[in-house]
């Protein structure tokens, strides 16, 4: 039996052979799994590369869009003799004209229609074209002294008022052929330089002026020059009164002085010499003011403290939100420029404002107007 058992041993070794074959199959399975794992890694890396590529493409698109959004300025320049103290534009029929007070004592009127058409037709990168124009429509030497007061009437086409540093206010009336007749007898009454002028937007012939003598005066230009001064506010500011602006919708005037104060005057009570509102925030003389063209209670101002501010006189104080030193009517402060000279609202785009300074100009849009 033992011998038979020994002979039969090979048959009992069969399971060993089966085990060896199983190990070979296991090795094959491991290799297959390794191949699959490598393929998965490659696929993942491939997807990662695609993701990186997609991110790069997205960044490129963002940069391209940002470049498209970069502001472009297309300008047309008109050569002008002498420095410009103040400039004001107006529409005369199909033409656009601007009046300039220069430091040579001249007031000139220029037709800028062609310049505007050229700038509107420009495209592409920012550029400036200089026009070969050397002759204004009209020039008036007046008293021969320079000035700052300059205002077009919005009610009577072509009517212009100018005020100079020797206290005189001249009235201009447009005649046929693009000429103006300038009054031989100026309006007089101020004791020092006339700093700014503003026509009433609702009553034809009514003009406001302010002066370095600290006063604000109202004039009925339909009257004889000696009788034209219908109201005087002495000591309207405890300093020079630099600028004024007339509200388009209400009988309100805002003024700004060297004292840094902003004052609101009602025509109903101005003869009593008391403003209906006073705001003190700027730390230097006020250089410009302008009421918003549509928002009745909103105006903008700038000062020698390099700040441009926006105000809403209808805002009331709230004890829970008041900040010390900041009037509740102050809605917005724009900074970052040096020696801001003028501020203006865009007449069509709500909330869009522009200011000019010694280092350029800014165009900005607020979110609360």
Image (cartoon, rainbow, N blue to C red):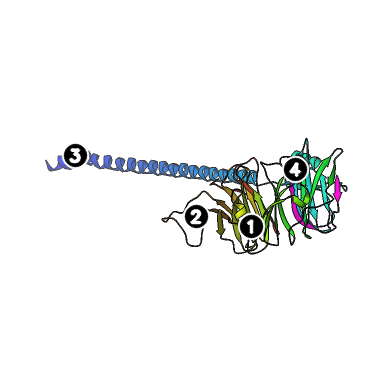
What residue occupies the far left of the structure in this picture? Answer: 1
Q: Which residue is mark 2?
A: 328
Q: CA distance from mark 3 to mark 2?
A: 110 Å
Label 2 vs 4, first from the N-terminus: 4
Q: Quadrant of residue 119?
A: top right
- How crowded pointer 2 is (Cα within 10 Å; few <14, some 14-19, many 20+) is rated as many
Which quadrant would residue 347 be assigned to in this image?
Answer: top right
**CA gap, disc 1 and disc 4:** 24 Å
Horizontal and vertical percent for residue 205?
72, 44
Residue at the image position 74 percent from the left and 54 percent from the top? 149
Q: Residue furthest top?
A: 94
Separation of marks 1 and 2 at Cα, in angstroms: 19 Å
In front here: 7 or 303? 303
Of label 1 and label 2, which has the lower sequence position?
1
Q: Examine the structure image and report whether residue 159 is included in the region drawn in magenta.
A: no
Circle number at residue 256: 1
The magenta region covers 135-156
Dots 2 and 4: beta carbons under 8 Å?
no
Quadrant placement of the N terminus: top left
Residue under pointer 4: 90
> Which one is nearer the viewer's eye here, 139 or 173?
173
**Residue 354 in view (yes/no):** no
Instruction: Indicate which disc residue 8 carries.
Output: 3
Q: Which mark is residue 343?
A: none
Viewer-side label of 1, 4: 1
Instruction: State if disc 2 and disc 1 touch (CB < 8 Å).
Output: no
SS of the residue at dot 3? loop
């Amino acid at each position: 039996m033992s011998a038979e058992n020994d002979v039969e041993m090979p048959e009992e070794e069969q399971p060993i052979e089966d085990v060896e074959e199983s190990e070979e199959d296991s090795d094959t399975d491991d290799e297959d799994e390794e191949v699959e794992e490598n393929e998965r890694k490659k696929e993942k890396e491939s997807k990662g590369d695609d993701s990186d590529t997609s991110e790069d493409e997205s960044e490129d698109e963002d940069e391209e869009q940002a470049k498209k959004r970069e502001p472009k300025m297309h300008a047309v320049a008109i050569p002008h003799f002498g420095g410009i103290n103040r400039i004001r534009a107006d529409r005369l029929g199909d033409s656009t004209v601007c009046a300039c007070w220069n430091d040579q004592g001249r007031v000139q009127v220029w037709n800028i229609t062609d310049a505007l058409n050229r700038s509107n037709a420009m495209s592409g990168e920012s550029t400036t074209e200089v026009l070969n124009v050397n002759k204004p429509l009209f020039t008036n030497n007046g008293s021969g002294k320079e000035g700052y007061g300059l205002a077009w009437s919005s009610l009577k086409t072509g009517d212009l008022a100018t005020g100079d540093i020797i206290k005189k206010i001249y009235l201009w009336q447009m005649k046929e052929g693009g000429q103006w007749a300038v009054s031989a007898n100026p309006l007089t009454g101020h004791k020092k330089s006339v700093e700014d002028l503003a026509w009433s937007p609702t009553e034809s012939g009514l003009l406001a002026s302010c002066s370095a003598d600290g006063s604000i005066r109202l004039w009925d230009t339909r009257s004889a020059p000696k009788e034209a001064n219908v109201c005087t506010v002495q000591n309207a500011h405890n300093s020079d009164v630099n600028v004024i602006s007339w509200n388009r919708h209400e009988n309100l005037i805002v003024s700004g002085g060297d004292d840094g104060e902003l004052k609101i005057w009602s025509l109903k009570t101005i003869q009593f010499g008391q403003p209906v509102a006073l705001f003190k925030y700027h730390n230097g003389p006020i250089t410009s003011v302008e009421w918003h063209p549509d928002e009745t209670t909103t105006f903008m101002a700038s000062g020698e403290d390099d700040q441009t501010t926006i105000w809403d006189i209808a805002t009331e104080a709230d004890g829970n939100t008041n900040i010390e030193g900041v009037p509740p009517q102050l809605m917005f402060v724009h900074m970052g420029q040096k020696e801001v000279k003028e501020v203006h609202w865009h007449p069509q785009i709500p909330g869009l404002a522009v200011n000019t300074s010694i280092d350029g100009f800014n165009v900005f849009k607020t979110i609360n107007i």
